[in-house]
Structures are given as C-alpha cells and as structure tokens.
Amino acid sequence: MPLHRLALAAAALAAPALLAAGAAAGAAPIPLPEQRAADHLVVTITHSGDLEGTFHLYCHPSTGSTHPRAADACKQLDGGTTWGKDPFAPVPKDQICPMIYGGPQQAHVTGRWAGRPVDAHFNRTNGCETARWDKFSILFGEPKARAMT
C-alpha cells in the first residue's frame, strides 16, 4: 500500500477515537455553519409581565428578528446547544422536582434550531420547570415578581 494511503487509513481510524474523546471530555458545542443559517424560532410568551407576545428570532445572522434582545438570545442559545442533545427537551417524566411554584409564566417555542425542528412548551409550575425556564432567561425575559394576595 502506498504511503499516502497508509496515512489516510490511519487518519480514518483515528477520527472516531478523537471525536469520542472530545465528547467524553465535555468538549465545547460544535457549531454547524451550514445548518445554523436556517435557525429561526417563533417564541410566544404569556403571563410574564416582562416580555409578552410573539417574537421571531433569527440567528446567524440575527437580522429580521423582532425579539428585543435578539443578539443576546442567540448567544444564550448557542451556549446551551451541544451536539447530540436537544436544548429544548422537556423535563423527564420520572424526574423528581421540588413542588415550588415559580409563577404563571408560559412560553411556546416553535421553528428550527441547529437543523432540528422545535416545538417546546415552558412554564414555571415546579422547581424543575423553573430551572428549565431560567436556562432561556434572555429569550423569555425575567419574570416580574407578583404580589401575593
């Protein structure tokens, strides 16, 4: 076998091991430029007191967005996106959550992110849902404190 074919064969064998090592070490998110150009989310927020209504968020670039903090929201989403994991995944059904009501806020996100379809619902009905909401604090805005009556 010619030398250049040996080098190519060695590189082909090493590539999966390098990818696995990077994933195991908690490597940084891998951006996918060709897929990221289509990132568009429609975000509807209700009962928030801060951001309310429906916003369009375009990332990469964020031109055309109606979200008031589009660039910051895109950065937050980019930081929470990891290859092979759904950043919008719901709380697992068997998750034990503190029964601490976080407020009436609700959000619905649809569209495409990182080449995948998105259709996710968010609320603050318990500690797990509130923590999930907080991961998207820029996208959803900070909930206003409500007076207890």
Image (cartoon, rainbow, N blue to C red):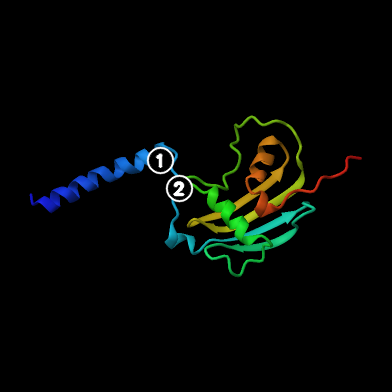
- The residue under the point 45% across, 47% down is 83
- Image location of residue 84, percent across then percent down: 45, 46
Q: Quadrant of residue 100?
A: top right
Marks 1 and 2, how far apart in space? Answer: 9 Å
Residue depicted at x 57% and y 55%: 75
Q: Nearer the viewer, residue 93 or 12?
A: 12
Left or right side of 29 for 66: right
Please state if 124 lies on the left or on the right of 135 as rendered: right
Q: Of the residues under marks 1 and 2, which one precedes in the sequence?
A: 1
Left or right, 13 with reference to 20: left
* Extreme-right residue of the structure: 149
Residue under the image location 41 percent in, 37 percent down: 25
Name the residue furthest bottom: 64
Q: Residues within 10 Å of mark 2 (few under 14, many from 20)?
A: some
Indicate the quadrant containing the C terminus: top left, top right, bottom left or bottom right. Answer: top right
Residue drawn at (25%, 43%), measured in percent from left and top? 14
Can you say whether 13 is above or below 42 in the image?
A: above
Q: How many marks?
A: 2
- State if disc 2 and disc 1 touch (CB < 8 Å): yes
Q: Which mark is residue 23?
A: 1
Tag 1: amino acid: Ala
Return the mark for residue 129. none
Considering only vertical position in the picture, is 99 above or below 67?
A: above
Q: Which mark is residue 83?
A: 2
Label 2 secondary element: loop
The percent position of residue 77, horizontal first and vertical second, equals 57, 52
Disc 1 on helix, strand or loop?
helix
The amino acid type found where label 2 is placed reads Trp
Q: Residue furthest left?
A: 1
Q: Position of residue 125 (x, y in %)?
A: 73, 40
